[in-house]
Image (cartoon, rainbow, N blue to C red):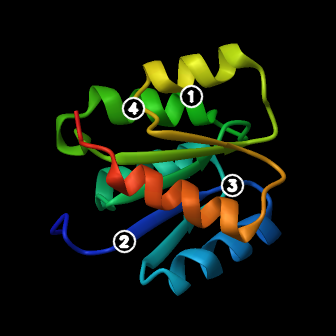
Amino acid sequence: MSQTEKTALVVDDDPDIRKVLGAYLTRLGFTVSFASDGRSAIKRLDESRPLLLCVDLMLPESSGYDVCEHVRKTEALKGLLILMVSARTMPEDRAYAEELGVKCYLAKPFTQAQFVAAVQETLSQDAP
């Protein structure tokens, strides 16, 4: 898959949040796929590399941190742009996410405008 294609993987265990984020990303021109837990997200990432990974921190099976660690360790996923969305707002959560390569950390709840701004900020970041 070419990195110029606007593809995104949305990973969240809440089906309503997956639906909303998918709709927001579709309006931004993305083709969106979904995963409901960390393990299936890792499997999808190993099968097909999106341009953007939008991942929740607290997931069943494997956490958002686990997903980010997998991305960091996998050569084929190097430079993947990661936007983390989470209800956790502790500074240490943000710091660890950044250490794992997260480009932007968005606290839940958020508005559509905040999400769009976070996506744009993430896309504007240089890949490592």
The image quarter containing residue 19 is: bottom right
Q: Which quadrant would residue 73 be assigned to in this image?
A: top left
Label 1 – label 2 distance at C-alpha? 21 Å
Q: Amino acid at mark 1?
A: Tyr
- x and y percentages locating residue 1 in the rendered image: 18, 68
Three-letter amino acid code at disc 4?
A: His
- Residue closest to the eye, 102 or 114: 114
Question: In the rendered image, which residue does mark 4 sit on?
Answer: 70
Q: Which residue is mark 1?
A: 65
Q: Residues within 10 Å of mark 3 (few under 14, many from 20)?
A: many
Give SS at disc 2.
strand
Q: Earlier in the sequence, mark 1 or mark 2?
A: 2
Amino acid identity at mark 2: Thr
Q: With 76 as the anchor, is 105 left or right in this view?
A: right
Q: CA distance from mark 4 to mark 3?
A: 17 Å
Task: Report whether 52 appears left or right of 59.
Answer: left
Residue type, numbered disc 3: Asp
Of badges 2 and 4, the one in the foreground is: 2
Q: Are marks 2 and 3 in contact (CB under 8 Å)?
A: no
Q: Marks 2/4: CA distance? A: 19 Å
Question: Which is more toward the observer, 118 or 69?
Answer: 118
Q: Which residue is mark 2?
A: 7
